[in-house]
Structure formats: structure tokens, C-alpha cells
Amino acid sequence: MMTIKNLLDLFSQTRADSEKICQPLQTEDYVVQPIVDVSPPKWHLGHTTWFFEEFLLDPYFPDYKRFHKQYAYVFNSYYESVGKRVVRTDRGNLSRPSVQEIYEYRKYVTQHMEELISNHWNTEWNPVLEIGIHHEKQHQELLLTDIKFILGNNPLQPIYGEITDEVLIENTQKEFIEIKEGIYHIGHELEEFCYDNEQPKHRVFLEPYAIANRLVTNGEWIEFINDGGYSNSLLWHTEGWDWVKKNGINSPMYWFKNQNEEWSHYLLSGAKKINTKAAVTHISYYEAFAFAQWKELRLPTEFEWEAAQSKINHGSRWEWTESAYLPYPNYKKPDGALGEYNGKFMVNQKVLRGSSIATAANHARPTYRNFFHAPLRWQFTSLRLAKSL
Amino acid sequence: MMTIKNLLDLFSQTRADSEKICQPLQTEDYVVQPIVDVSPPKWHLGHTTWFFEEFLLDPYFPDYKRFHKQYAYVFNSYYESVGKRVVRTDRGNLSRPSVQEIYEYRKYVTQHMEELISNHWNTEWNPVLEIGIHHEKQHQELLLTDIKFILGNNPLQPIYGEITDEVLIENTQKEFIEIKEGIYHIGHELEEFCYDNEQPKHRVFLEPYAIANRLVTNGEWIEFINDGGYSNSLLWHTEGWDWVKKNGINSPMYWFKNQNEEWSHYLLSGAKKINTKAAVTHISYYEAFAFAQWKELRLPTEFEWEAAQSKINHGSRWEWTESAYLPYPNYKKPDGALGEYNGKFMVNQKVLRGSSIATAANHARPTYRNFFHAPLRWQFTSLRLAKSL
Amino acid sequence: MMTIKNLLDLFSQTRADSEKICQPLQTEDYVVQPIVDVSPPKWHLGHTTWFFEEFLLDPYFPDYKRFHKQYAYVFNSYYESVGKRVVRTDRGNLSRPSVQEIYEYRKYVTQHMEELISNHWNTEWNPVLEIGIHHEKQHQELLLTDIKFILGNNPLQPIYGEITDEVLIENTQKEFIEIKEGIYHIGHELEEFCYDNEQPKHRVFLEPYAIANRLVTNGEWIEFINDGGYSNSLLWHTEGWDWVKKNGINSPMYWFKNQNEEWSHYLLSGAKKINTKAAVTHISYYEAFAFAQWKELRLPTEFEWEAAQSKINHGSRWEWTESAYLPYPNYKKPDGALGEYNGKFMVNQKVLRGSSIATAANHARPTYRNFFHAPLRWQFTSLRLAKSL
Amino acid sequence: MMTIKNLLDLFSQTRADSEKICQPLQTEDYVVQPIVDVSPPKWHLGHTTWFFEEFLLDPYFPDYKRFHKQYAYVFNSYYESVGKRVVRTDRGNLSRPSVQEIYEYRKYVTQHMEELISNHWNTEWNPVLEIGIHHEKQHQELLLTDIKFILGNNPLQPIYGEITDEVLIENTQKEFIEIKEGIYHIGHELEEFCYDNEQPKHRVFLEPYAIANRLVTNGEWIEFINDGGYSNSLLWHTEGWDWVKKNGINSPMYWFKNQNEEWSHYLLSGAKKINTKAAVTHISYYEAFAFAQWKELRLPTEFEWEAAQSKINHGSRWEWTESAYLPYPNYKKPDGALGEYNGKFMVNQKVLRGSSIATAANHARPTYRNFFHAPLRWQFTSLRLAKSL
């Protein structure tokens, strides 16, 4: 269990990290919401702050006075049990509170939290604080991917900074690691923090399979494109194929052809030519599935992935799995508003495993279950192939 | 393996059965498509016929002449690899071919098929014939549920006939049958027909659980309604809750209050008062999940269902499970157009197990996997509760 | 004023005419509603019947018993003040009442009406009867155009019968008839029937103009197509251009290219090659406007059309005018439910003048004002050019 | 004709005025686009600047170098003939160019324009310059109304400043001014600037009518509400009624009930109680029409308005008329890209006459024709009653 000192440091560091991610932004970049899945950066900054105010300061800080009585309404997200909320599609319509006001709000809440942790703390509150910290870390990843979407879809293609968001796979032959049939333990049981959806630890039987030692590369993806992958309906799920046709999809997100007709893509450090040795990124589950079909292979399940995770390199890209996002046997939703955290999304989403270059330090674990809808591509997603033996 | 004589009988019986289901209809009832999921009965009659023409008569009958060259276009459904098709939402706009022409088409194809089976048969074609027969049996169930929707949503509430589509659960206390942890075999391996998605047989580890010996009743559902089940967001998935609010859902499909403010429902034999001892029916997965949450229980997975199936009564209602519709380990999609049969739907659907009073004789099996989207309610769906031990 | 005998004959003839139009239909053709603007023929037959029951039999026939108490709900259209109604997009979902039941309903109402007119008539009811008759004549035109849409959009292109719905313009040079500036009387004042929207007669000042002696031909339209008319945004209204792009419009409705790449179109007598000397038909207002722009001419206003009507041939096609559908000075909406007849549509529609080959005998007048939304094309619409002098 | 000195002054003053309107904004307020009709203030500032660069600097300034080659793409609005453009619904997704960059763009273009006018001017360019200036004045009005929408729909209801956007009608009895029948001259013919749509001057015959000497008040509107105006379908156009029901409309835009259940509204100076003596504002054409129906009166046509304009007070609110926005007889669209200015919108819009407190000085004229779609309410719209005599 973490000491209070450790918790305080982790809290303060996390709060500082969010602001650091936004440091290269201009004020205008904080405001827009180009698609419903991408929230304005200023909303992320406010929402993560509201969490601490709502679930810790308001109930526990002596005589706490909220920074602004309307902010609970503006910055609540999906917690239906905690009052009215701004609908998700409205976030990008709100010019106020201003960015400066939100930074003041952050400062106010951070200071009161530090005071609460330092001088009035009750260790019974640890779980909520840990969720709050990890909740903010989760939004740090969204901050970066949302910023990439905001800048990368602007016709001026502005540069964010010298961050490397292309990951090379050098000197690596693709090989399949064979895993024996048997009962495997899946899920989290250690003492340290995890989300409710990673528990309880339980047993899963796996038939024998093999899993690739590396991600699929851009070079392989270009072969898929050149072989007509985006125009062969037989490779796709019905709804994937409808998505391709309706949206005119013919390459991963952020890809375009430059003046010399070479495949290029927008990166946070500016647009550049595709590196064929880098991992393919910004693909939907539909695309990952179709690619695997084209290879006459398949995606691993999340259980196969977890059972093999110590034998594969991971951590640069979220990896689509074949698994649907469902509760583990004996899963218990936490009581109260925090019970809405994960369970209410357990339908019609796919599990992604691993983590990405945008994931906050110490946030992911081998048992971590990320989840998105099948067509979404703005996260740093990729795929790893598998096969039954 | 079936003899040719058996196959012929099964074929002829199946063809006759489809027409028998439509016997009480007026010509107009064959034509309409009130929602995208409900196809016009005349389309079902034509589509199941086209299947035999496309996959058996056209390739194998000596000098076969198609009944009408445009019918392949009109009656193809989702087989992207076999030419253009009428989009699903257009089926209800087509007044022609007329019902009589479709019956002539059926007769023509049935006779040629009987001739093919009797005099020119090659047992290598058995699998396609069996799929064709089972495909038609599947559409027989859809025929009845689509007819119920067409008549039940008409303000005149016309009677279909003296069919009993309400299933009593008499003298049955709800009890939970306990199942031990262990490795269970799931899937089909017998010689007789099954669909690709039931294969291959494989091993699944189940943690200990208990499963109810009967379905939930209308009486229990009325308690759920009266306890505010449809207005408590915490019981629902986020997307289920959105569905409730957007569509103003407050009871199962076909339910309404009569002049005395008693819960009633449309039945194929005419509208009547709800019987509280009958199994609740025509509910979506979202509703099934919310009900289980309200009971502080859960739905079984499809594996738990199959492992327990010999110990429970089933067969009157399709039972929503918690499982997403996914391929079994080592699942192989058949080659060619028939490969589109099941695999292409394996995303964002839920599995239902069992069968219903509308299921054709000898069509379902304990390993049978039905699947629908979470909000759909026009099938004879119900739920059975389960819990982890 | 019409005698009772004349009214009775006109009533009986009108009732018979509607049924004659439907005589070539198969039962299935009566049922479908492929787009919201096209109603099922059986609905037209029921709705025109309901009008007489609602506004004459129910209030005035001694001890009248309605044929079926639910029909007022099923066949009401837009009369908000007379109870609930089936929303327009639901009409095509209703298989019942059956076609035969609707013919029985017609017979019942026709007989009671004939009895009412013959034996219990009060001449104060003449205006309502006349509206009812003209209302049915109006629906006769819709019946034919809706039938054309239903059959013409079916992939089998079924033939309706030996009706000539292509109108040749033979031996006619296009000439412009000059009309002098001055005050013209517009609107209806004669004793015979007219709609409220044609009244009152009033004065309009017209600047000098010229109007074409004939409609635009298919030949001229093909020149427009070949000159890129459908791809030159500058010829179109902004919303017309959006309509072109969204719907992929590149020719009038029902046009297609045959195997020899010749422009052809569906006619009620079957598909055939375009006759370049026939009047172009089935065009939207947007197309009419763009064509006139391309010719550096314009459409006439409805006032210019009416002032010149005695000098031009008209009657085969409804002619789009530049006028919006608005009330005449001193226009009075009739009291009660019949007040909803015309006035409530006087926004965002364009006026068409003349009449078409589908217009019922004795239905149109030189002062008649037809009106449709700018994108609609399923009526027998055409255009006549004009210019300011 | 204006001297070059006058033109230069008018230009410089207009450029300064736009920036003055934005002076109270925070950077974030410049960025958002809450509905498609409301553009981000920064877009208005850029778009009006682009106009001068595109139509004057680029063709005529010696060796002109554009400020940024992508801006023509970002800031073009509806000129289809001048290259690609950002679709209107995307404007609010663009965080860049930043507000500061746009001010620099403005400064660059303003200085080059001043140089062009002062030292290189050719009076043949006067018409384009005048259009550019009036185009910017038009956007000044939109700037203010869009800012009101952005702030007034924010849950924090931020204050813009001490501007009075409520207009009292004091000591004025409503009286109807009678106008005699006769031929009136409508449209513009003076030497000074006007838009193409106000020309040519022409003759219109008006039947005798009367027009109110003042606008309808909030007090009268509250009577309309209290008398059930928003729930009586018979007062409304069909599409107006659909709009009311679909959007849950029950009062003018910006109205809400305060804690004491008194009608209040958002003003640029902050929310306050409704003043019953002020002119009703922020109503749609549908509402104006329904109100007039309720009074058993009507709206004036734009011709009636213009013929009476010297006898009535106007200038504080745009007044909906019954007229559709259509070309005058002999209307000529200007050549080239500027020809897209007005003509392409002449379908399905209503004319508003007068001007509002947000209209730039010297922008409106008695012949000025403003136009909006029937449901729009974010302009300072109101209504004046009329009747036929």
C-alpha cells in the first residue's frame, strides 16, 4: 500500500503532467471538438479536476467551498448519478470557462487536495484518490490523441512539437511464438491499483495458438492496400464494409499522398513520408480484422494476449484483440457513482491490450483492458497477428 | 449421413412448411416492411427459393433455365460475392414480383430441385442442400416473427390465427442449479448438420456458477416496471439508456395498457391481458441486462448455458446471453459465397441460445448459436438469470 | 350553380374514375410507399372516401353509422383539427385494411352519399361536396403519378397500360410571345368552383415580358446535359447544387441509358428511347431554374403565366414558375378543418401552373395554383422559358 | 460618386469597426461554432479580409504576395467559382489560424489596401471595393448576433458589455396606417451603393392595406403564449408546426423563466426580466406568422413595407415580411464570382425589411432586402402587423 507521502507525490506529479502535455498549445487549440469522440483539451483539464472536487473535496475537506457552482454541470461527463451534465456533443460549443479560468480552477483544487492529503487524510479514501489519479492519467493519453486529431485535421497541419509518434520495428523478423494449451490465470490480483474491470483474477482455458512477436508494419499495410484490401468485401465484416463505403476509407487515419504520390502521414512533429518499417497505426478494429483475413490469420483474444504478454514486445501501440469488452466472471460493479466507471460500457466495444507511447507512465499493466468502438481510429492503435495451432 | 430419400423428404417438407406459415395471410400482408429488420413475407418466400436456384440448380441441373433473370438481383440478400443486391431497406418498396408470381417461382424451383435430387444427385452436394434447407427453416422463424410485427403494429391489430405465442411457466419455483467449475466441451461435433459458427468443438474453463431453472415471468417484469426499472439509469448500459430515452421505451414490445389500465399485449391470436405466469417476451438485450442488474444477478454466458442445457427447460424462447457473437478457436469460414453465411456478422452482436416456439422443427440444437443486435425485440426473446458462486 | 342532379352525376363519375385508374393494378401495387411523397394507392382510395364520411355523412346523414371506427384514424391525412392521424411515413407499413375492404368502404360511402344527395340534400352543403369531389380529382392525379413511381422504380419495370405519357411537340418553332406592361387581373371570380388559394381576384402590375409558345424539349435538355449543365455550380441555386451533389442527379427522373448508351426513360407503357421532340418531364424546380440560367433566360412568374395563358398551349405538363406559393392579397382561410386545406402549406413551396395529362377532367382552370417543394420530380413537371423585355 | 478620399476613409473606418465589435471577447470566444448558422468570430474577421485580398489585392496590387497561401481555402465561404472551401460546418473545428495570426492578416491586408487605394487606384474598381466594404458591414452585424448566440447559449451566461439590445416602444398606441391602392415604385435607383438584389427599380400594384405604426411587444407575445399560441396547430404552417414540436419551442429564443417563474431573457449586458413594453425579438418567421394568425391579421409583403416605410418607425429590428426572397423583374446577376453574391440564395427564404440595432451605420437602406430561412431566430428579428382593406 502506498504511503501518504507517495500518494501526495503521485498526485502532484500527475497534476503537473497534464499541464505539461498542453504546454505547446495555443489558446484556440484548447477549445474545439472536431468529432464527438475528441474532447476539447480545456474540457479534459476541467473534468479531471472536477473529479477530485466532486468525490473528495466536497465530501471531506472541512468547509470546502466549490470554485464555481456551475462547474459541476460543465465538467461532469458520464456520471448520470451526479446531476445534470453537458452532452458530449456540446463540449466544443462552450467558449467559457476560459482556459485561464480552468488553470485557476486546477490550481485551486490541486492546492486544496494537497492540503487534504497532507493534513486531513483518512486512508479509507485511498481507493478514490487512486482512481482519481489514474482517471487523470487516462485523460492524459486522451489529451495527446485529441490534440493530434485537432492539429492533424487542420488544413495548416500545425506542429505540436518534437515528440516521436512513429515507432520503428527494426531488425525484427516476424515470428510466431507458440503457446501451449492449458488453463491460464487472467486478471489482476496484486495489491497495487487496478481498475474494477481487470478483476477478479480467474481461470481461462486456451486451445494451443501462436502469436506474432511484433506488430504489423506500414510496409505490410501498403501491400494490403496495393492488393485491393479496401475494395474486397469478402475480407470485411458486413458492418465494417458499410463503414468503408460510407466514409470512403482507403488507408489508415492521417495518411495522405504527397505531391510525389508517396504515402505520407501527419505526425505531431509535422507531416512526413511513411516509414515502411514502422508499426502501422491509427487503424480501426474493422481494418485490423480485414488485414488478418487477408493474411489468412486472425487477431489474438485478450486472454491469448495476456497469457503471452511476457514473451512479446509491447507498449508502443494499443493492440486490437478479437475479444469483446465483457465482464470477467464474478465481476462486481463498485457502489455509487464510481460504479459507473467501467461496467456501463460493457457492450458493443472491443478490447485493446498493451499501451501506447501516449500512455502515462505507470498507468498500464499487463492486465489492463482498454476498450473502444470498432470504427475508432484516433488512438495509437495497431494490430498483432495470431493463429490457432 | 442422410439418405437421398431422407434429404428429398426433408426438402419437400421444408418447402411446404414455409407456405403453410403464410397461409393465413392476405396478399397485402406479404408486401410491407415496417422496419428494416422485418422483411416482407414475399421476400422471404423468394429469397429462400433463390438460394436453391443460385447454389444448386444453376450450377448442377442440366441445361437449367432460370425462372426469371432479374430474380437473382431482387432476392439476393447479403451475399456480396454473388452480384448486386436490393438494399435491405428497399425490400418493402417492391410491389413486384407479385405474390402469385413468387408462388410460381417456388413451384418451379421446388420441382426442379426434386428432379435434381431424385435423378441427378451427387452426394458431394449434400452440404449445400442441407444449408439450403436449414436456411429456409431459419427464414420460417423470421416469417412468423415478421408477420407478428406487421400485424401487431397495425392499428387494427388483425388476428393471424389460433397459434399460442404466450408460454406459461406453471407450478415452477425459480431455483438455481449449481454447476461446478471445470473444463467443458463447447460446440458441435456430431455427424449431423450444424452451422459453421458452432464449430469446432473446443474446451472452455468455467468458474463455478448457478443458473435459473426457468425464464423470468411477466409478473416479475411488472415488478421491475413498478419499481422504476425503466427510469433508473444506473441499471443500464450507457447505450441501453440512450436507447430507452430516445425511443421512449417503458415495457416489452407489444405491451400496452387496455381501457382498464391493465397491461395487455398483442398476440398472434389477438390482443389480450398479460398473463403474469407466462415468460416475459420481446425484450432487448439492454432490457435483459438491466433486469438482471436490478435483481443483483446476471445473464449466463453462452458457455454456461451450453454446459447447463441438459439440466434446464428450454425451447420456448430465445435466451439472451452475456456473450458477444465471436468465432470459436480455430473457426474456419467456408470457402466461396457460403463463407459469408455467418462469419461476417461476428461483431457487435449478442448470442442467444435455446430456440423458440417459432423455430422450425429439427432446426435448433443445444450448440445452436443465434445472434441479434442488442436493441432488437421482434424475435421471441426472453431471459434466464445466473450468478457466479 | 350546379343542380343536385349535376352534383350527383359529378360525384358518381368522380368516384368511378378513381377506381378506373387503379383497374390495371395488382393487389401488391396498392400497398407500397417507396418515398414519403408517394402514398400507397389504397391509401388514396381510402382517404378520399374518408373525406366524405367525415365532413358530410357523419354530420348530416340521419343516424349514420361509420363503416369502421378506426378508419378515421387510418385515412386522415393532414387535418390536425380532426383527431389523430397516421404519420405520412407510416402509410406504407399498413397492410390492413385490405384492398378489398377499402373497396367495400368506398361502396358503402358512395351509396350513402348518393342517398344523402338524392334524398336529404341541403344546398348549403354544396361547397363541402364540391371540395370533396375536387379533392378526389386531385388525388386521381396523385394516384397516377404515384403508380408511375411505384412501377417505374421497380427493377422489373412493369407496364401499367397503353397510356401515352410522353407528349410530342411537333412542328413547333420556339417563339417568344411579347406581353405589354400593365395592370392584369389575377385570380378567380367566376361562379363555378375554385380553391380558396385562387381567390380573391386582384390586380397585379407586370413589367413588359415575353413567354415561350412551347415547353422545353428533351432534345434541348440533352444539350444541357452534354454541355455540363449538371456539373456547373454557377447555374444553380446553392441548395439546388447541394441537392444535385447529394443525390448524384445527372438527368430527369426515370431517365437511364440503355445498352446502346442511348438516353431512355420509363413510361407507363414501358421503357423506351427518349424522343427528342417531346417535352422534357419529371424535373425539379432546381433543374428548371438551372436550365433557364444556362439559356440566359428565366422562368415566368405565375402572374406572367396567367396573363399570357390564353396565348400559349398548355395542359400536358405542370409548369414550374418562379413564384413562391403565397396568399393573394385579402386571402381568407375558410373556417374549421377545411381551413387547413391550402393555407397551411404557403411557405417554402413553388407554384406550378397549367395542368398535366394526369389531371382529372374539369379539374384545372387557368387560375389553378398547384404547388410542390423545389426538389420534387415525380409529378409530370416541365418548364417554359420567359424573359424580361 | 464617392471620392477616393471618401472611399479610403470608409474602408479604414469599416475595418476598424469590425475589430471594435470583438474587443470585449476572450480568445476562446472567437473559436466556437455552436450551430451551423453561427460562424466563429475569427472566421468573420478572416473571411472579410480574404474578400479584399481575393478580389482586389491579388489581381491589382503590383507584385502582391498573399499573406498565407492556405488562407484562401480556409476563409472562402460560398464562392464556388473561386476554388475549394471549408464546409460551413467545419469552421468551428479549426483552431488555427490563431486569433493573433488573423489580426496580423487583417493588418497586412488593410495596409496593402490603403496603399492600393491611395497610390494605385483605378476608379473602375470602385464597385468591387464598395461591395467589399458593405460585405464587411454585413458581417459586422453577424459578428454581434453570433457573439450573442455563443455567449447566450453558454451555461455561464457571460456578459458581453454595456450594449442595449432591448428596444422599448414607449407611449405608442398601436395604430394602423392606411395606404391607398395604386402603382408603387419598388427598388433602388440612386447613384449610391446598393446590392444587386435591390434592382432594378420597377412598378408594383398594391391593393389597399393598412400597416401598424409599431412592432409587436413582449407583452403582446406573453398574451399569445398564455392563450396557448404554441400549442394550437391551426395557427401554424404545417412545417412551422413540425418545427415547434420537434424542437420543443414555447417562447422566443433566449427566453427562460427565472426562479420566480417570471419570463426573462439573455441580453448582451446580462440576463434580465422581460420588459413587456419592448419589441419582441429573436422569433422565427413561423412564429411571426402564427402570431399574426392569432390576431386575425397578417404580415405585410416587402412591397407594402417599402411603400409605407416613410410613415413608420423602423430600424431597431429586422421585420419578417410575407414575401419570399425572389428576383425583381429584369434582375441581372453580376458576372463572375461576385455574381454568386445574392442570386444563388433566391429560393426558400423569406425577406426581412428594415434594419436592427446591430446593423452597421450607413449599411441599410429603405430598399434593402435581408433574407433568412423561416426557422432562424438568432438575428434581431421582430414583426409588424398588417391587414388588407
Image (tube, coloured by chain):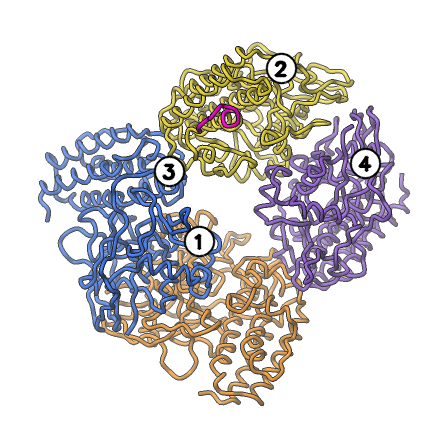
Chain colours: A yellow, B purple, C orange, D blue
Q: Quadrant of residue A262?
A: top left
Secondary element at tag 2: loop
Looking at the picture, which amino acid does disc 4 mark? Thr
The residues colored magenta run A57-65
Q: Do labels 2 and 1 touch, CB within 8 Å?
A: no
Q: Nearer the viewer, mark 2 or mark 3?
A: 2
Name the residue that disc number 3 marks.
Answer: D86
Q: Quadrant of residue D289?
A: bottom left
Name the residue that disc number 1 marks.
Answer: D249
Secondary element at tag 1: loop
Q: Is residue A13 magenta?
A: no
Q: Which mark is residue A192?
A: 2
- Give how far apart the Cα atoms at labels 2 and 3 are: 50 Å
Question: Can residue A273 be seen from the camera position used here?
Answer: no
Query: Are the residues under badges 4 and 1 in a single subunit?
Result: no
- Give how far apart the Cα atoms at labels 4 and 3 are: 54 Å
- Give how far apart the Cα atoms at labels 4 and 2 are: 41 Å
Q: Do labels 4 and 3 touch, CB within 8 Å?
A: no
Name the residue that disc number 4 marks.
Answer: B367
Looking at the picture, which amino acid does disc 1 mark? Ile
The residue sitting at 74% across, 26% down in the picture is B329
Residue D55 position, x and y percent, is 23, 40
